[in-house]
Amino acid sequence: MAMSCAGMSPRSEGRRRLLSWIATTALLLSRAVAAGLEIRAVTGDDSPVTRQALDVLRNRLPGVVSGDIRTLAQRQADAIYLTVGPAALQGALKVELKAAILSLYTSSHSYRQVLASAVPSTSSRRITAIYAEASPEHQLRLISAIFQRRVLVGVLITSSTSHLEPWLQHAARESNLDIQIHMVPPGANVVRELNRLANAHVLLALPDPVIYSPDNVREVLESTYRRGQPMVGFSQGMVRAGVIASAYSSADDIAAQAQELIPAIEAGAVPETGYPIYWRVAVNEQVARSLNIVITDEVRNLGRRPGTRTR
C-alpha cells in the first residue's frame, strides 16, 4: 500500500523533494534550450585546471559550448556566458555582450579587481558571480566545530579585504567566537604582523594575495607552527601546505550551483553575487595530531553537498 505524504519518513520526504527539484530544473533547462538559448563557457587558457573545470561543467550542463570569448561571441543564438577563471572574465568584459555573464572559479578578491579595472564600465551589464572560495562564515563555523568552545580567532586584513570586517564580526558572533582583526600596513612584513595576534587561539587566513602569497606562505606557516598556533585556511592547497583545516568548495559544488542559477538568469533575473552555498571540509590530520587537536567526524563531515541540507 502506498504511504501517504503525512506518513512519509524524513528520508523519503527528502528524496521526494530532491526528485521534484531535479524535474523542475530539467524542465526549465529544456525550455531554455527550446528557446534557442546557448550556455557558453568562456576560457582564458588551456591549463589542466581550466580543462578540469570544463569537464565538470559539461557533466552538469550537457551541450555547453566552450571556447575563447571572441569565437563564442560570433555565434548567433542567444546565450548565457559562464566565465571559467579570472582571465576568461577579463576577456569577456572587453566584448560588448548583451547576454548575462556568470563568473565561476574566480576568487572574491580577483572578481572585485577585474570589475574595478574593466573598460568600458560594467555598471549597465548583467554580471554576477559564484566566488571560488568558501565564505568566511563557513570558515568560522568550522573553527567553532573544531574547538567546541569560545575561542579567540585572529585575522589579518589589508585594504583589499577590509570590506569583510563587518561580515567577520557578525559571523563570529553567530558562531559564538571572539575575533581580533588586525590591518596590515602596506609593505609590512607579514610574519612580524602575525605577532600582533599572538594571543589568538587560532588564526583564520583570508584569500588576500597581499598577505598570503606563494613566496611567503611557508614562512608564515612555520612561524605559527613553532608557537603552536593553528591556522585555518581557505583552500585545499593551504591544507596540503600545512594549515590544520579549511572549508572549501569543489569544482562540482560550484557547477551544481551554477546549474541551479541558470533558469533564473534565463528568465531575466541576475542573482546576487556571493559565495558558494555548497561546501565541504579538508583536514591536515598530521598537523592536527602534532598540535594535539582532535578532529572529530562531525568536523570532517561538516558542510553542504549538492542535493543535501546544511549540516
Image (cartoon, rainbow, N blue to C red):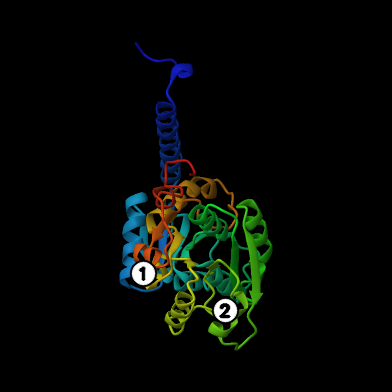
Most extreme residue toward the right, as rendered?
166
Say which of 58 and 35 sits in front: 58
Residue 40, image x and y in percent? Answer: 41, 59
Q: Is residue 101 above or below residue 36?
A: below
Counting from the top left corner in percent of width and height, residue 35 is at 45, 45
Q: Spot the residue most to the top.
A: 1
Q: Nearer the viewer, mark 1 or mark 2?
A: 2
Instruction: Name the residue: 42% across, 67% down.
Output: 291
49 or 46, which lies in front?
49
Identity, as a three-letter code, of the amino acid under mark 1 = Arg
Residue sitting at 38 percent across and 68 percent down? 290
Q: Is residue 218 above or below residue 284?
A: below
Q: Quadrant of residue 69?
A: bottom left
First in residue order: circle 1 vs circle 2? 2
Label ID, residue 240: 1
Crowding at mark 1 (Cα within 10 Å: few <14, some 14-19, many 20+) = some
Residue name at image x 49 percent, y 44 percent: 310
Residue under circle 2? 194
In the rendered image, the vertical position of residue 283 relative to residue 191, given as above or below: above
Near mark 2 (Cα within 10 A), the count class, few <14, some 14-19 or many ≥20, is some
- Disc 2 marks a residue whose amino acid type is Leu
Which image quarter is the N terminus in?
Answer: top left
Q: Residue at x 43, y 31 (%)?
A: 14
Residue 34 quadrant: top left
Question: SS class of the residue under badge 1?
Answer: helix
Q: Position of residue 273 (x, y in %)?
A: 58, 58
Q: CA distance from mark 1 to mark 2?
A: 21 Å
Q: SS at mark 2?
A: helix
> Where's residue 114, x and y in %?
55, 73
Horizontal side of residue 171 vs 306, given as left or right: right
